[in-house]
Image (cartoon, rainbow, N blue to C red):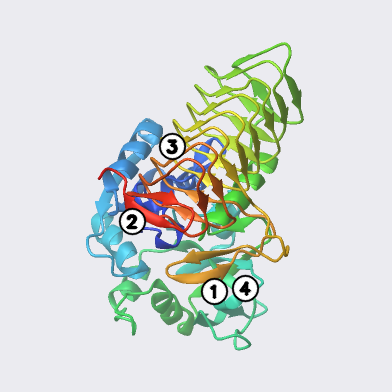
Amino acid sequence: MIGIVLAAGEGTRMRPLTYTRPKVLLPVADRRLVDFSVRALLEAGVDELVVVTEYLAEKVEGYLESKYGDDVDITFVRQGEPLGTAHAVYVAWTEVEPDDTVIVANGDMVYESRMVLEAVREHSTVATMALVEVEDPSEFGVVDIDEDGFVSDLVEKPAPGEAPSNLANAGVYVLEPEFGEYLEEVRPSPRGEFEITDALLDAARDGELRGVPYDGYWSDVGRPWDLLDANAWVLENEMPRPYVDGVVSEDAVIEGPVWIEEGAEVGPGVVIKGPVYVGPGCEIGPNCYVRPATTFVADVRVGQAVEVKNSVIMEGTNVSHLSYVGDSVIGAGCNLGAGTVIANLRHDERNVRVVVKGELEDTGRRKFGAVIADGVKTGINTSILPGRKLGPNSATAPGTVVRKNVPAGKMLVSGDQVFVDRRG
């Protein structure tokens, strides 16, 4: 079988994290988003992998080649202009001209491998799609299936109250070579993109599309707070048995499932309550308190008396002493000055809201901290209000309060939100 992984998108809803990294390489615990689809396809028996890339393609290709190049033949195909999901699949399809079953999977999802295995097992027509139940069908492509599992209707992002069901397209498809004919017939949508749902709908009209409901965990990780949910789920459900390969002080306290990689050090007086992942080269402590659902990706330095909870902190970031990081996503190469505090709860206890693509969105969470991009530096005693974003290579002056988002490359220099060029 041939596997196609779609990994070309920019991930604009994940800004500012994706200004400097492709969305599919965002970390959850000890892996990246793209690993879930690659591993699922390999477990399903794929012996040839085609990965469609474009945005920051070299980073995606380098990561996958180094991690899987010895296990499977990988072909990388650049999508070029982003013209939609059907276009991305078609670019890969014409590259390999398949004469065997093809499994297509989005590369930016977190899910159990059995979703793919179940779709393959139930596959008996030209096309099969995995389905998941969702609370808000208006965010997804939604289908209706008959008693035999054939798709009878497929609506892309239906208006509230008009969805035919709550079964959504999960982004995994099992396809026969004949599906190429449906891809060739797709025409641009009103927004100018070639949508794979149009090809699937044509197959459904011919009685050649089945839907296979999947009842396990699934997330398309569309927004930064989804990354925290996915990270927590992976730590709880997808990790191997806990292990300590690094150096842990005899005065440290480790409770619950904790994974400490080789080269990591945990200092005296540190308390870690799992599930927590401490990546290679990290230094934690002394006297730190690390609470559940936290991931330190690699080479993270955490100073004295720092508290961290339910957060993802990426490579090479330094969190100086007497700081607090809660319910936050911190990029790579950051330096949080001593006494930096990230607030994660509004005084009125309403859900935290975050600006996404220029619109204020409800996170659905009472507690959510900050989204900090790569290369950010905060001055000592900086306070960051809930739901704020700091763009790549931005900074704050000592003692400032971040009340609104800080643009990339700018420095917040006073409490009334005055910005200057950071390097100016």
- CA gap between label 2 and label 1 equals 21 Å
Query: Is the Cβ of the residue at disc 2 closer than 8 Å to that at disc 4?
Result: no
To which quarter of the image does residue 250 belong? top right
- CA gap between label 3 and label 2 equals 26 Å
Which residue was labeled with disc 3? 334
Q: In the rendered view, does 325 fall on the left or right side of 126?
A: right
* Nearer-the-camera pick, 408 or 110: 408
Residue 2 appearing in the image: no
Mark 3 or mark 4: name the one nearer the start of the chain. 4
Mark 2 or mark 1: name the one nearer the start of the chain. 2
User: Is residue 228 placed above or below 307 in the rendered structure?
Assistant: below
- CA gap between label 3 and label 1 equals 33 Å
Which residue was labeled with disc 4? 167
The residue that appears at 55% across and 72% down in the rendered structure is 210
Mark 3 or mark 1: name the one nearer the start of the chain. 1
Percent position (x, y) of residue 344? 64, 52
Quadrant of the image containing the C terminus: top left
Percent position (x, y) of residue 135? 67, 72
- CA gap between label 4 and label 1 equals 11 Å
**Structural crowding at the residue carrying mark 1, measured as other residues with C-alpha within 10 Å and reported as few (<14), some (14–19) or many (≥20):** some
Which residue was labeled with disc 1? 139
Disc number at residue 8? 2
**Structural crowding at the residue carrying mark 4, measured as other residues with C-alpha within 10 Å and reported as few (<14), some (14–19) or many (≥20):** many
Type of amino acid at the residue the image marks with label 1: Glu
Name of the residue lying farthest toward the bottom = 162
Kindly state the secondary structure of the residue where label 1 is placed. Answer: helix
